[in-house]
Image: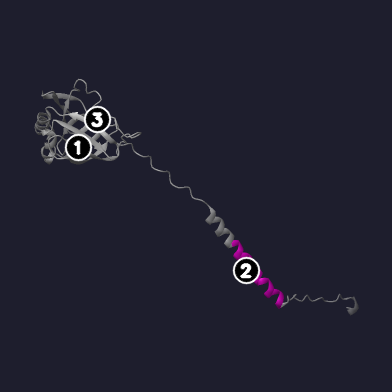
Amino acid sequence: MDRQHLAPVVRLRPVLRDRHAVRAATPSALLTGALLTGLALALSACETVPPPPAAAQQPAAGLPDGPSKPFSSGKGWTVTIHTPPGGKPFCVAERGIPVGQNAAPRLSFRTAAAESGFILSGFTPSDSGATVKPGERYDLAVMSDLGPRLSLSARGLPNGSLYVAVPTKGFLEEMEPLARAHRVSFRSSGLGDIGTMLLSGSSWAINASDECRILHAES
């Protein structure tokens, strides 16, 4: 075969990049990757997580109550037995409102197996704007005409009354100043002057309510 008719053989040589160009490109790629990573972290950090919903505040509970039946009466007081549905029975000693004392506070004694005490109701606090807040704790000063001054702790009830609780085992001892007094006044630093009331027959009411508790509320 005639050599002049043969096509020349072309050999392709690999193109070698300049080492300086390779070295210059490598830091740029790393920097770009670092920037992208940092941007992703910044965006994730900026995402706000909504706080969990606040738990609904439970209303302050009042004292349990239930159907009542009479136990005894005397000295202007009436003692009744109350049986809450699914709860333990308790006794209450209340007095009718004397004539001319509609605006005076009312006092009722409550006795149960573990906790007893008294409820102060029917009063209007003297301080302007002061109202009984359910569940709130109030200091209660009790000044009687016969006996020492008492410093007690009361809890506000949903109906605007104040409840003073004492352990049942010390009920008679704690209520002795109220049993002997004929006239008593109440005051609280958070509510002001609460009022003054007569306690005729209170000794009978306290003892009768405790007797009712022994017979009917200890089961």
The amino acid type found where label 3 is placed reads Ser
Label pair 2/1, CB-CB below 8 angstroms: no
Extreme bottom residue here?
3
* Rendered residue at 22%/39% (across/down): 141
- Tag 1 residue: 142
The amino acid type found where label 2 is placed reads Leu
SS category of the residue bearing label 3: strand
Residue 8 drawn above or below residue 218: below
> Where residue 179 sits: x, y (%)?
11, 33
- The label number, if any, that marks residue 30 in the structure image: 2
Q: CA distance from mark 1 to mark 3?
A: 14 Å
Label pair 3/2, CB-CB below 8 angstroms: no
- Tag 3 residue: 121
Which is in the foreground here, disc 1 or disc 3?
1
Observer-nearest of 74 and 79: 74
Observer-nearest of 177 and 58: 177
Q: Quadrant of residue 211?
A: top left
Say left or right for 64 vs 33.
left
Quarter of the image with the C terminus is top left
* Rendered residue at 12%/41% (across/down): 170
Magenta part of the chain: 19-36
